[in-house]
Amino acid sequence: MAKPVPEINAGSMADIAFLLLIFFLVTTSMDVDKGIQRRLPPMPDESQQVEAEQINKRNIMVVLINSNDRLFAGGHEMHITMLKDKVKEFLTNPANLPNLPEKRERDIEGFGPVMVSRAVVSLQNDRGTSYNAYIQVQNELVKAFNEVRDEFAMLHFGKKYNFLEEDQQRIVREAVPMNLSEREPREVKTRRRR
Amino acid sequence: MAKFKTKRDKSLKPISTASLPDVVFMLLFFFMISVSFRQVERVVTVRLPEATEIAKLDRKDLASHINIGSPIPAFQAQYGTDSRIQLNDTFSTIDDIRDFIAASRESMSEADRPLMTVNLKVDENVRMGIVTDVKQELRRCSALKIMYSTRKKTEHSGF
């Protein structure tokens, strides 16, 4: 009687397959789409007379990126790292300075009267601005708004904006409106005002 | 003790684990097949800029993608290296965006149409001129929800 062929030990086969499985699970990037979400303003009707909303000069801050990716905010050239604090100061106007935006009392449903700033940040860019610079500035502006919202939420609800209930988020959104306007693009001449 | 052990060994065969690899391989194949690879082939190179204030796209099925960047090397002889717009998997111009948006609206259900997001995947070296043209065209098509696709910022970067 012939000796039976010894069975090959397949116990480690499972380990190898598991290793492969885990390798694939880790290396396949699920390619999650993420980014900065914005809403474009609707196109004004051509038949309709465009009435430019008069905004008081103190309430508007022009953030301009020129074709050399140089940043100007509120009339001064500045580095991108300074932009966020500058915008935050502009939005909150902590000392109620006359040259920073005015605040108007507004009654928010379910919360009460709040002093809401009328600040508008106007982002302008040139056709030659690089997309990277534009996104960096856009990012800093969104960050400034988010931080002001977080501060408001911390003060009144003791939590950051993202952790609030739906209704509280609405209150914060109304108290700190995101007035970020993107001017119709135009050629920005490299002209000096002075 | 020894006597007891031998008795046990004879009566109880080890459980065969030979089918375990098959099960695991099945799992492996399932994952390999179900992972969706990129549906459209890119004809432009896109290196996304970095940002920190990012949000995830909540409804992936309601997004239509517009890629803008320099053509991949295989097409550079034909199209040059200037930034171009890619819709679906072909090079397009600004005028094609209207049809593209209309087509992607058409494929959605009535209720989902207002939620449509246009995902702008733009290379970081692209000039803003072409991007603003696209944005203006989107405004004209009233596709107002847009997302600037970015990567999560890693340490030490700026511009």
Image (cartoon, coloured by chain):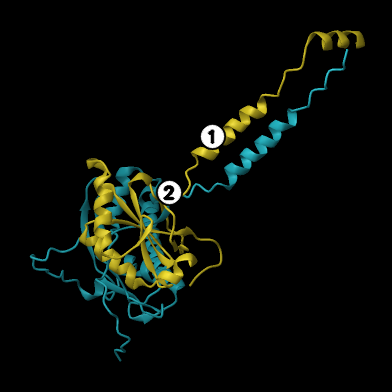
Chain colours: A cyan, B yellow
Q: Which quarter of the figure is the N terminus of chain B placed in?
A: top right
Residue A99 in the image: state x and y as whole percent. 28, 76
Q: Chain of mark 1?
A: B
Tell me what residue is drawn at x 20 percent, y 53 percent.
A107
A168 in relation to A192, above or below: above
Give the residue number, with chain letter if any, for mark 1: B30
Marker disc for residue B39: 2
Tell me what residue is drawn at x 31 percent, y 52 percent.
B117
Residue B63 in the image: state x and y as whole percent. 34, 50
Q: Nearer the viewer, residue B155 or B63?
A: B63
Q: Residues within 10 Å of mark 2 (few under 14, many from 20)?
A: few
Number of numbered discs on residues: 2
Q: Residue furthest bottom?
A: A194
> Mark 1: which amino acid?
Phe
Left or right position of A158 against A172: right
CB of mark 1 within 8 Å of CB of mark 2?
Answer: no
> Mark 2: which amino acid?
Gln
Residue B103 in the image: state x and y as whole percent. 26, 50
B1 in relation to A134, above or below: above
Marker disc for residue A72: none
Q: Quadrant of residue A68?
A: bottom left
**In this rendering, do the residues under marks 1 and 2 share a single chain?**
yes
Tell me what residue is drawn at x 56 percent, y 63 percent.
B155
Residue B83 visible in the current orientation: yes
Left or right position of B90 against A20: left
Q: Chain of mark 2?
A: B
Q: Residue furthest front?
A: A1
Left or right position of A17 against A191: right
Using the numbered discs, state the Cα–Cα distance from disc 1 to disc 2 in whole angstroms. Answer: 19 Å
